[in-house]
Amino acid sequence: MARNDWMKRLGLLFLYGSACVAHHAPADEATAMAVLRAGCTEDVQRLCANVQPGGGRILACLKEHKDTLSDKCKQAAQQATSLSAPAASPSTAPSSGLTSGAATAVPSPAAASAPPPNTQGKSAAQASSSVTAKRGAAAADAPGAYLRLKKVEISYAHVASLPEPQPGIEMLVPSSWDYKSAIQMFAGKGGCPSDSFSVFWEAKSEDGATKAQGIPNYSWQYSDDPQELQKLTNPNRRWHNGDGGSNDVCPVSKPLNAEQYLRQNVLNDLTPKMTLISIEPLPALEQIVRQQNGLPADGGSSGVRVEAIRARMEFQKDDKPMELWYSVALVTQTYRVGRGFLYDLHAVGQMAFGAPKGKLDANDKLFKVILSSIQPTDPYSAFAAKNIASEYQLQAKKEAAIDQIQADLENTITQTYLHMSANAQRVSDQGFRAVDQNVRDVQSFRDPSTGRTFELSNQYGHAWLNGANEYVMSNDPNFNPNSQLSGNWNQLQPVPP
């Protein structure tokens, strides 16, 4: 008997043994068996190749090796159990997060085009995809499940007085989600020159239940030198012309760490009111911020500190319980001045991601995909850095007429921004990204049709691209969007950075 036929027979025997303990639930049994076969055949070959088929021995073997089963097989078993359990239905089946390896139905994180309901004669991957599509959408972990994304852009044409839209920031969001964005001048909470460009964006699912939002940066300053602190709090010395001619003073308050900032400056301003549940470090965001500012990945930069966190919150919306993640990175730059230091603080990378209660964990990978995809373009980064530096140069000229020491400090800050912009490009060219890709939750892919290499989230091992700036990502090596989705999809090749 050919080896492939032998393995198919093993897989079928295993599925037969599984069916015997599935409580004879007829509703989704065929699909459940297809899911198991797709997910566990490799485990049967690896762990139970010497076991005599029949009598449930293959199933017993897998149970005996339950601690060494592949994630793919565990996920398939859990999904098959939920499909064949007698009390389970799309509305009542228990939902478990991706951390447990389950494939969880979530509110529209993927624009999955559902195949026809008849799954007879289809592959296991296609059958699974059909079921998850029926349930609204699927976290792209189960065999045949996928995440369909589109590239969107935030244009800076308006603030740069450009005749045509130009991409300032690029990112990925689910293809079916609504998306809107803008970059405005001095439209944030503060008045620091570093916050000249206020970036807003929002992406939400078709039913509006799941939503991600980008929040503009917020900066402030402080000094532990009394004379310098007096200068900082003097509005006649510290101001700039905001949009519409407003004279916004750069806020002055004591340095905070990331958690303190979130508790004091974010939590009380959120609408509706929210309850803080937990706070955890977010290393991926820290490395994203370091890369974009040209800072070393190991944190060994004198005078600059970066700390990133993600907070979990709960709230009520339209009398329905909701959950939310709020991410923020706090960048603290320290300058020697007088008898102390000047602290220049920036809250960046602020993003809110909300979902119905019980669905947030199932969206963890989607949160990371969106977060890791947000990338300013080189022209926009250079344009913004140059304009922010010019704001500080104007302040330095104003201060020079009053206090040369203060003017020198402003010039130092100016050089910091110019250096950060130049260094960000330099470290990128030197392969900086290769060092920290795992921490930033990204990996390099190559488009074989064009030879172009770029970064995508590493939450999924397989990716495809079509000619309309749409992406499909999946963990199923047997999944092929060309057999299930419209359009022509080119598979991207994982490559070293």
Image: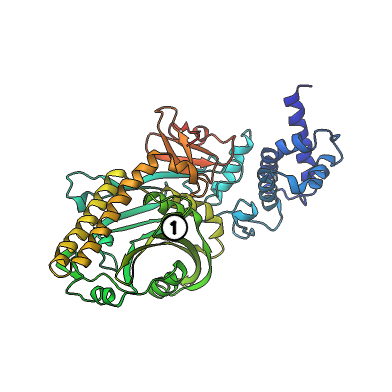
Q: Residue furthest top?
A: 1
Instruction: Answer with left or right where residue 74 lies relative to residue 191.
Output: right
- Percent position of residue 474, x then y: 54, 41
Q: Position of residue 348 (x, y in %)?
A: 37, 60
Type of colouring: rainbow
Residue at image x 55%, y 50%?
Answer: 139
Tell me residue 96's x, y (percent): 62, 58
Q: Label 1, on which residue?
A: 207
Residue depicted at x 38% and y 38%: 429
Q: Position of residue 73 (x, y in %)?
A: 69, 44
Does residue 354 appear anywhere in the picture? no
**Residue 180 lies in quadrant:** bottom left
Q: Is residue 197 above or below residue 246?
A: above
Residue 308 seen from this side: yes
Residue type indicated by callout 1: Asp
Please count the marks in the image: 1
In percent of the image, x 71 and y 54: which residue is there? Answer: 85
| Residue at point 17%, 67% (across, down) | 399
Judge by depth and name the residue closer to the eye, 174 or 198: 198
> Residue 94, relative to residue 485: is it above or below?
below
Q: Quadrant of the N terminus?
A: top right
Q: Is residue 446 above or below residue 181?
A: above
Viewed as shown, does residue 457 lie left or right of 292? right
Q: Compare residues 338 and 71 and report the one nearer the observer.
A: 338
Dot 1: within a 10 Å radius of its alpha carbon, few (fewer than 14), some, or many (20 or more) residues? few
Q: Residue furthest left?
A: 401
On screen, residue 84 versus residue 137, left or right, reads right
Q: Which secondary structure, mark 1?
A: loop
